[in-house]
Image (cartoon, helix red, strand yellow):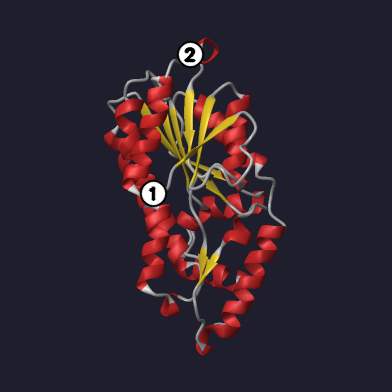
Amino acid sequence: MAIAEDAQDKPVALVTGASSGLGKVMAEALAAEGYQVFGTSRDPGRAAPPSGVRLIAMDVDDDASVENAVGAVIAETGRLDLLLCSAGFGFMGPIEDSASAEMIAQFQTNVFGVHRACRAALSHLRRRPAAKILVVGSLAGIVGLPYQGMYSASKFALEGYCEALRMELRDSPVRVALVQPGDFSTGFTGSRRFVADVSAPHAAAFARALAIVQEDEANGGDIALIADAIVRLAADPAPPLRTVVASAEQAELAEARPATDPAEWEALIAEHYGLEPG
């Protein structure tokens, strides 16, 4: 397909999980900054596309789907300057009650989906003079959250993955960075998945933790702040590995974690989620 003249000089961004919520807002922010943005969705015909964004089909759980989507972008534009990995979902439930299949599904999307996208895109990103891979992590990737253990594990995995990938690409033109959002008011709450059954020993504590999580998210910040951070990182020739985007209180806690006594930290998190001491 021929490349339109007015698009030839625009940097090209591919945003996974862009049909709704945070992914949609970030894709629109990049388009407003002058990027030619391709957003991905499992079913791009189900929802109106984000403003200024072309929605294309991609299932990050499927190797061929990811490779085909990246190939389609390259076939149309001849370039890829930015990969933004946003596709993912939350999961809540006691670890004790969670099936292996539920954990596999969590990692399939949140971790392996990022790897599939990076692997498919990297050979094309290397051809650009200042390419970026930006990954949406979470403060749950530095704090093991009770009853969100599998979600936290997936975000912890991204921390290590991105740190290693960044070092492996030091001698290339590709820079890797993570954003670590705290609580924000998005569609994430409504799309969260849950364990099939909560056993009696966990029922009361899980109910308290769930209510607190939902309240924290309902009172969370404006996701435009995350989109602003993504735009800044995309423009930064030397972005930091990690950027916390959160309330002042959550940002302070994240900064204090390395120097906090582990027992004190555990008590602080447990108290926030209403967990009774043993």
Closer to the camera: disc 2 or disc 1?
2
- Are the residues flagged by discs 2 and 1 in contact, CB closer than 8 Å? no
Residue sitting at x 56%, y 84%: 203
Task: Identify the amino acid type marked 2.
Answer: Gln
Residue sitting at x 57%, y 29%: 30
Q: Position of residue 17 (x, y in %)?
A: 51, 45
Q: Which residue is mark 2?
A: 8
Position of 111 with respect to 146 (left or right) is: left
Position of 151 with respect to 222 (left or right) is: left
Q: Quadrant of the N terminus?
A: top left
Tell me, yes or no, if residue 237 can be seen here. yes
Q: Position of residue 129 (x, y in %)?
A: 37, 18
**Quadrant in the picture for residue 123:** top left
Mark linked to residue 113: 1
Position of 67 with respect to 205 (left or right) is: left
The correct choice, above or below, for 12 with respect to 142 in the image is above
**Disc 2 element:** loop
| Badge 1: residue crowd in 10 Å (few <14, some 14–19, many ≥20) | many
Q: Position of residue 253 (x, y in %)?
A: 57, 55
Front in this rendered view, residue 153 or 170: 153
Residue sitting at x 51%, y 52%: 138
The alpha-carbon separation of the residues under discs 2 and 1 comes to 29 Å
Task: Identify the amino acid type marked 1.
Answer: Gly
The correct choice, above or below, for 94 with respect to 265 in the image is below
